[in-house]
Amino acid sequence: MFKTIYNLFIREVKSIANDKGLFILVIIAPLIYSFYYGTTYINKIEQNLDVTIVDNDMSQTSRKLASYLDATQMVDVNKVEHDINKAYNNFVMDETKAIVYIPNNFENNLKESKGATIKLYLNNVRFLASNDIYLTLNKVVGTINAGIRIKYLESTGLSKDQAMNAFEPVALDLRPMFNTSESYGDFILPGLIILVLHQLLLIAVAASGAKENELNTWGELSFKTGNSPFKVLTGKGTFYFIIYLFYFIFFMSVNFGVFNLIVRGSFVALLIVGLASIFALINLGFLVGTFLRKRVSAIQFIAFTSYPFLLMSGFSYPQFAMPKFIVVLSQLFPSTPMLDAVVRITQAGAGLADVTTPILHLLVMGVVFYILAAFRVSGRMKKLQTNIS
């Protein structure tokens, strides 16, 4: 039995080595794509977002507000205008991401304790940038408000400490537990790199199965294995298991190091998630490949599923906000428990005990896909034997 599996393993190695398309897909593509997609988010957070200030007050306080805003890491005050229409044209031409409008008598109203309103015009098409600008301006305005209020309280005879306590009797001590830099790159990159591995493994295995259909070689496999679909799946699958386990470890160490990604949880747990994911994906790939007539069909079909897998997984959009049938459907694909476990380990510091459910989910799917693929392979071999006879 082991000799047969070994022979099928060597056969798969030779098949990949002699097939330029599969060689690029299996050996070269994972390295290229993982670094290519990772480089897209290498800066991780948006900085120096262009903001235009329309200052109709031209006072010391309005200039101070503009100076404070420009001093932040997130915002770059690229223009100071006095005409709202001109600023709006810059806004429409995407030369600025937001407009901060400071009205006439801004400083005088503050001195007379009448209050003043600053208008912020945001381009919510790019909601990440607009949210960052809003939070930054909110902090700057809060700082100015605090300074004005504390100065007034001090004028009534209170000490600085008393004035600060009177201004803010209830203080909020905010302590972010995970992703403390609020970096989109730190969140998206681990899952994105894993998803690249996910899709390329599916394509490679499905293409291998489709190649057997294309070259009509199920009869050869039937002869070599004594018509055993389990030997076929195990022999061919072992090659992909070894290769992609290496890539998984490579990505978790080298790629994560290059992009300064931190695994806050257990690396052992992450490795076990990788093993379970590869097991499930290989068997799903073989199952899909038995239905495809040509290798190119595998690339087309799996590539078509990339966005649905990502969207349904809950990685980019929370599942509690999705329709129930989408959530149920997503549980049929390995990407859902895989990305769930990866996020928990890399972002929330989860250990093995915290991700047992997604690991068991992956293992169950792997066994089910293995059995279904075995039935399909057995059917293909029997059909070919019938046609030959």
Image: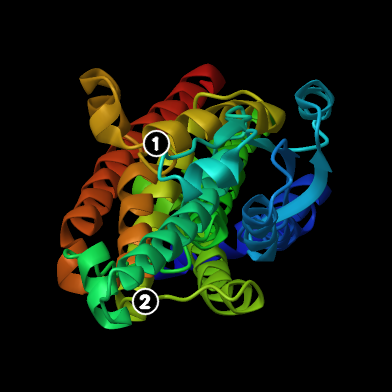
Residue in view at x 52 percent, y 63 percent: 186
Dot 1: what SS?
loop
Residue 27 location, quadrant: bottom right
- 315 left or right of 355 in image: right
Dot 2: what SS?
loop
Mark seen at residue 387? none
Say above or below: 88 vs 27.
Answer: above
Residue 331 shows in this picture: no
- 132 left or right of 114 in image: right
Residue 313 pos. (x, y %)? 37, 38
Residue pointed to by mark 2: 264
Say above or below: 365 vs 75.
Answer: above
Q: Residues within 10 Å of mark 1 (few under 14, many from 20)?
A: few
Residue pointed to by mark 1: 317
Is the N terminus in the top left, top right, bottom left or bottom right quadrant? bottom left
Front-lying residue, 250 or 322: 322
Q: Which of the colour schemes (rainbow, by chain, secondary structure, one colour) is used?
A: rainbow
Residue 79 location, quadrant: top right
Front-lying residue, 313 or 239: 313
